[in-house]
Amino acid sequence: MTDQHIQALEAAGHDIGIPLKRDLAEILLGVAADVAAQKPTGRPLVLGVSGAQGSGKSTISELLKTALGTAHGLAAVALSIDDFYLPKAERERLAATVHPLCRTRGVPGTHDPALARRTIDSLLTAGPEAKTPLPQFSKLEDDRVPESLWPAFTGRPDVVILEGWCVGARYRDPQSWSGPINALEAEKDPEGIWWRWSNSQLKAGYLELWDMFDLLLFIRVPDFQTVVESRLAQEETLAARNPELAKGRMSREEIITFTAHYERYTQQLREDLPPVADIVLDRERGYTYRRLK
């Protein structure tokens, strides 16, 4: 680790509008070194990055790309599970046939894990000139971007990163349901029908996707209130940068309702992943990080 590598990370943080603290830069360079050391011979390494909304997972994934390149000469591509959401029409069909809460993107069952696996498989086996289309999802339109507009990655990367809030989610015994945990569930899913369906979807493709990981990094937040506050801060930042996004900006009450869709899984991940993840970072309040393992 050198000052040159830290400066490269600081510059990358500046480019994406994130003031990067030196302690986080040092942590990420350490993580990059561990990833580089674990890379299999002859094929790319697949890294899963999991963390609640607002935990910093997207930023950390982007900065890891820089650290892997500048410090180890490894080319990385970062994918977001958000870009594998089902199209709006498919979620509307699920809302009509399974449960109305399926309309809201986010929980397992509202993604296309088979598309994610095919995309990663394509990257793992790509030739030097091969172009792998990378799916894109528009949160502004709440729909998948037309395939003709997807960007493409040329060649075979050394590292494939898949980040997302529910990455690594574990299947739970359906009998573990013990009642609603928030107002949304109490009003919309008092019998746990939506959760049981979503939980069942983990076995229908997500677990196979997680099995592709060589390493799993988990970012733990202090509590669910931190998720709500972080999501509110994200709304304010995006609105300040993009007037178009400001038009659809959610109020605090809307954010509380929206994040309630994720609360049960966020708590489950916080319990399940620290013991099994290869790398664990604690995100404390004020976006201060420390590495636990």
Image: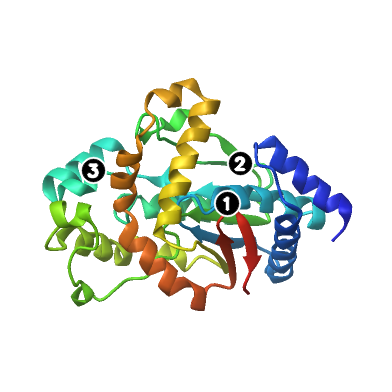
Q: In the shown orientation, is residue 179 left or right of residue 263?
A: left
Nearest-to-viewer mark from 1 and 3:
3
Q: Position of residue 143 (x, y in %)?
A: 35, 34
Asked if disc 1 and disc 2 are in contact, CB closer than 8 Å, the reply is: yes
How far apart marks 1 and 3 lie (CA) works out to: 31 Å
Under mark 1, the amino acid is Leu
Numbered badge on residue 103? 3
Image quarter (top left, top right, bottom left or bottom right) of the N terminus:
bottom right
Image quarter (top left, top right, bottom left or bottom right) of the C terminus:
bottom right
| Earlier-in-chain disc, 1 versus 2 | 1
Instruction: Kindly identify which residue carries mark 1.
Output: 123
How far apart marks 2 and 3 lie (CA) works out to: 31 Å
Q: How is the image coloured?
A: rainbow
Depicted 30 relative to depicted 149: above or below: below
Secondary structure beneath dot 1 equals helix
Asked if disc 2 and disc 3 are in contact, CB closer than 8 Å, the reply is: no
Secondary structure beneath dot 3 equals helix
Q: Position of residue 145 (x, y in %)?
A: 41, 32
| Earlier-in-chain disc, 2 versus 3 | 3
Instruction: Kindly identify which residue carries mark 2.
Output: 153
Residue 92 visible, this orientation: yes
Q: In the shown orientation, is residue 106 left or right of residue 43?
A: left
Q: For mark 1, does the 10 Å Cα neighbourhood hold few (<14), some (14 to 19), or many (20 or more) residues?
A: many
Q: Position of residue 272 (x, y in %)?
A: 42, 74
